[in-house]
Amino acid sequence: MYRILRQIAKTGIVTEPPRRTDENLRQIEQRLGDVVLRRFGRSLAIRHVDAGSCNGCELEIHAMNSPYCNPERLGIRFVASPRHADLLLVTGPVSRNMEVALRRTYDATPDPKLVVAIGDCGCSGGVFGESYASCGRVSNVIPVDVAVPGCPPDPAAILQGVLTAISARAR
Amino acid sequence: MRFEPLAIEAQPLSGALPAFQAAVAAAELRAACERAQAGGARLIALWGSDETERGAGFAAHLALAFSEGLLWLSAALDRERPRLPDLADLYPAAGRMQRAARDLLGIEIDGGDRRKWLRHGAWPADEHPLRKDFDATRRPPLEADAYPFVRVEGEGVHEIPVGPVHAGTIEPGHFRFSIVGEKILRLEERLGYKHKGIEKRFESLPLAEGARLAGRVSGDSTVAYAWAWAMALEGACGAEPPPRALVLRAILLELERIANHLGDLGYLGNDVALAFGFSQFWRLKEDLLRLNARLFGHRYLMDTVLPGGVARDLDRAGAEHLVARLAALRDEVATLRGIYDEHAGAQDRFIMTGQVPRELAARMGLTGFAGRASGLPHDLRADYPMPPWEQLEVRVAAHARGDVAARASVRFDELLESIRLIETLAGRLPRGETLAPLPPCPGGRRGVGWIEGWRGDVLIALDTADGGCAHRVHPHDPSWRNWPLLERAVMGNIVPDFPLINKSFNLSYSGQDL
């Protein structure tokens, strides 16, 4: 126990401030009213859905939960079921073998809800494109509020996308 | 030349890797595999191809590992009714590979498990995407996806279906647990959810664009795949990369190994409620990813290995900085290893959990660090020491118990060995070019790339077509051979230990689903 405490004290706090929101990432008009956004802003539950990625974006979502990015300090946490979620974080080109599962996950997420597509594949189909096995971009299957490009986007960019999704559109 | 272990004629494939190709008649394929298995050869991969555009029928291909090197063994199959003898009794890992070949090419299997594997509902049973006359841009209507799981019966037995969307941030797949109380009687995996047509995609791309796709077969192993692709293409072209590029590739590959082991060691702590371990290891991993981005331009080193060499050079100041940072990492990891080793709660969960005994591992073909944790000493870096490994004397990590604790211990050992290797490599960077352009590659050439990635050996088999394109590309992830062992490792364990056992292997879905 002493060694654990010593290591924690030695490490200190490494958390860095998040990036500002970026309206360029927004795909459609903000669907949520100000009241809802104020509540989301204080406590946001995310359900991640890998719809067919190479697993690269998952590495960066894991990295987003590292102490450097630490989204929990902002009230953002990952939950185990879409039924507990406010926001779906979707990676990958949507493989046709995941098409039904993604739709069902979206339907199982209670309204009001938001979708953030992660990575070049989620934004455009990426290197895999559209084919007999791939539906391409996430918005070909479910509505997408915010899309974050990158192969893969780094943790700060993913967090920025999430924060943009729950911010009011600049008027 | 004569390939003595199988007493057949074979031709060497060009490149530094000791690799050979040979052909047998379909009727003799099973006998050849019996001889190979009796002689201790390991099955690395099995795949099929459509040769009708070349005036033939179909073909089955096996990659087999002998102490002499890798043998690419092909058998021509009938054009109208391609059939393959069941090989799963000799090589259990062949079972799912045969089923995938049936889904993708319509090669029937004589006997054994004949359920679909990569096909769900995206194309009908009588169509086969890897046949040359299949239009990849067409999307057949989605069909209902019925799959007959094996039912376990008896008093008190019930099933837990999990996935494809899992509870954590993890790739999709379906696990069907049959349990009594909280004890797992049987686990059946159903994969293929991430099938996104990678092999067909390779055939539509110029060879020059293949590296980018190869580096995204399984994103956590991008260096291993990109190097395997480069090695395959260089072999097919008869080109050799500059010596400096080979040393840089080895540094990149070891950085990939370190990053993945750091992340998984953090999760192994997390999964036994030692959140401290997660925070510490993911801090160290993030530091390393940022160092990667600074030195090589990408956090995960994507697109840094190119056919003909590497995309980025490492100057002397960069090399010194890298070595200094890794020395600091070694001290940090040593501290954390001490804490993990002495943490009674963690060790209680790790020891004797998810055990794969050596005999079972050898019979089923467990590979990579998981195989080494079960007493199988295979490591391509030591078994076939090509440049730049030939002077490094890679110390192969080993453990005998095959449980979560053994896999954690081997990961620690390999991480520290990778630091040692990078220190040596960075001090021996030869002068010269880092990228030599490849000559145009004619059609009908073969090349193989085989690289010891962090998870295990990654294989890419390439057969070129005219016009700078690929006739057939088969990228093969070590997860094909390890997934069936996860089913065995969890037997008799409790359901709450499944995430821990799963993470201790951390197998690829994308690499298997293709």
Image (spheres, grey):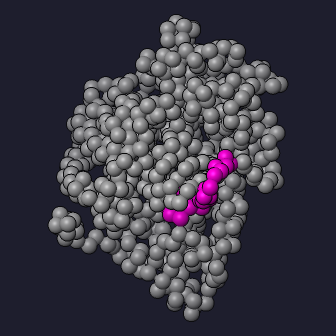
Does residue B173 belong to the magenta stretch?
yes
Closest to the observer: A63 or B305? A63
Does residue B370 belong to the magenta stretch?
no
Residue at x-position 36% and y-position 65%: B273
Residue at x-position 48% and y-position 49%: B492
Q: Is residue B61 above or below residue B106?
A: above
Question: Viewed as shown, does residue B348 lie left or right of B150?
Answer: left
Closest to the observer: B179 or B124? B179
> Could you say where residue B198 lies in the image, as x and y percent from the top left?
63, 43
Closest to the observer: B412 or A95? B412
Give the number of callouts: 0
Residue at x-position 62% and y-position 86%: A32
* Image-quadrant location for residue B224: top left
Q: Is residue B34 above or below residue B306?
A: above
> Could you say where residue B403 lies in the image, as x and y percent from the top left?
38, 45
* Image-quadrant location for residue A89: bottom right
* Residue B83 seen in the current view: yes
Q: Which residues are magenta?
A: B149-175
* Residue B216 seen in the current view: no
Q: Quadrant of the C terminus of chain B?
A: top right
Question: Viewed as shown, does residue B162 lie left or right of B429?
Answer: right
> Could you say where residue B42 lies in the image, as x and y percent from the top left?
49, 25
Residue at x-position 79% and y-position 42%: B125
> Could you say where residue B134 lies in the image, as x and y percent from the top left?
78, 39
Residue closest to the far bottom:
A35
Q: Main secondary structure of the magenta part?
A: loop
Question: Viewed as shown, does residue B320 lie left or right of A75?
Answer: left
